[in-house]
């Protein structure tokens, strides 16, 4: 039964992610799922609920969904899950997003794992690639060394101001290492965080004088 529900959910979700840009496409979901499975090797949790939440965590992302639509609710309504499972999955998804530092704290080990799995995909080499993929899709500058990163902001401010892709590192990505919940996630995050710092240092060297 669980395998059937996962396959049904995956098919519906993939159809949505295939319409997104490369920063939030189906490959992103595959990577987050692999991150979650890696964490699950050393952390006991409901693997089925974790995977369902991973599959659905971005289908209703405000950056992409159309006004009045809620793909997450629609897909969940069509799955043969009990109300407790559906509520748990929705609670997990609600805790995933960063929201400019105003995100909801995870209330279960499953939510901690999914949040970590998603944030790990936002840092390191893949995180760098995704940042510039999204910035390119939105027509944003690669960098603007005169732009001051915002240390505090509302969710609306975070989503509405089109800062350069490089500024995004200072407003979000470099903060994620210290927000990781699980021990397994923290080990992975340390290496990826260090890689981003090296990248930013090299980028500044190569763009010095081109401010």
Image (tube, rainbow, N blue to C red):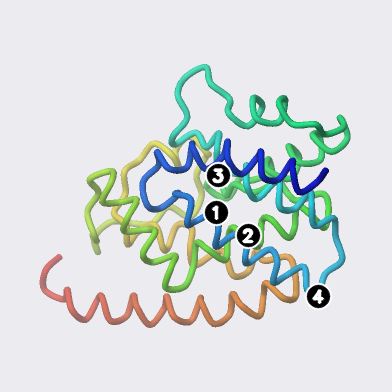
Badge 1 crowding class, 10 Å Cα cut-off, few under 14, some 14 to 19, many 20 or more, is many
Instruction: Work out whether mark 3 precedes mark 4 in sequence or the reverse, and give the earlier one.
Output: 4
Placement of the N terminus among the 4 image quadrants = top right
**Along the line of sight, the residue nearer the viewer: 9 or 107:** 9
Say which residue appears at 18% left-offset and 79% top-offset.
206
Say which residue appears at 49% left-offset and 33% top-offset.
62
Judged from this view, the residue extending furthest toward the top is 68
Instruction: Work out whether mark 1 precedes mark 4 in sequence or the reverse, and give the earlier one.
Output: 1
Query: Left or right: 42 with respect to 149?
Result: right
Q: CA distance from mark 1 to mark 4?
A: 21 Å
Badge 4 crowding class, 10 Å Cα cut-off, few under 14, some 14 to 19, many 20 or more, is few
Does residue 36 lie above or below 77 as drawn? below
Badge 2 crowding class, 10 Å Cα cut-off, few under 14, some 14 to 19, many 20 or more, is many
Placement of the C terminus among the 4 image quadrants = bottom left
- Residue hosting label 1: 29
- Residue hosting label 3: 99
Instruction: Work out whether mark 1 precedes mark 3 in sequence or the reverse, and give the earlier one.
Output: 1
Query: Left or right: 67 with respect to 142?
Result: right
- Residue hosting label 4: 42
Does residue 9 lie above or below 177 as drawn? above
């Amino acid at each position: 039964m669980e395998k059937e529900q996962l396959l049904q959910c995956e098919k519906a979700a993939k159809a949505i992610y295939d319409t997104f840009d490369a920063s939030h496409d189906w490959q992103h979901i595959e990577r987050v799922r692999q991150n979650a499975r890696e964490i699950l090797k050393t952390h006991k949790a409901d693997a089925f609920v974790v995977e369902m939440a991973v599959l659905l965590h971005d289908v209703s992302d405000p950056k992409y969904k159309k006004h009045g639509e809620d793909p997450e609710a629609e897909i969940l309504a069509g799955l043969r899950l009990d109300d407790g499972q559906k509520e748990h999955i929705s609670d997990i998804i609600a805790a995933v997003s960063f929201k400019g530092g105003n995100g909801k704290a995870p209330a279960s080990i499953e939510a901690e794992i999914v949040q970590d799995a998603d944030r790990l995909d936002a840092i390191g080499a893949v995180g760098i690639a995704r940042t510039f993929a999204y910035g390119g899709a939105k027509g944003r500058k690669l960098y603007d060394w005169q732009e001051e990163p915002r240390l505090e902001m509302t969710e609306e401010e975070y989503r509405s101001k089109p800062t350069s892709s490089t500024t995004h590192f200072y407003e979000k990505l470099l903060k994620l290492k210290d927000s990781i919940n699980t021990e397994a996630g923290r080990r992975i995050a340390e290496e990826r965080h260090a890689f981003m710092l090296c990248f930013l240092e090299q980028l500044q060297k190569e763009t010095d004088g081109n401010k």
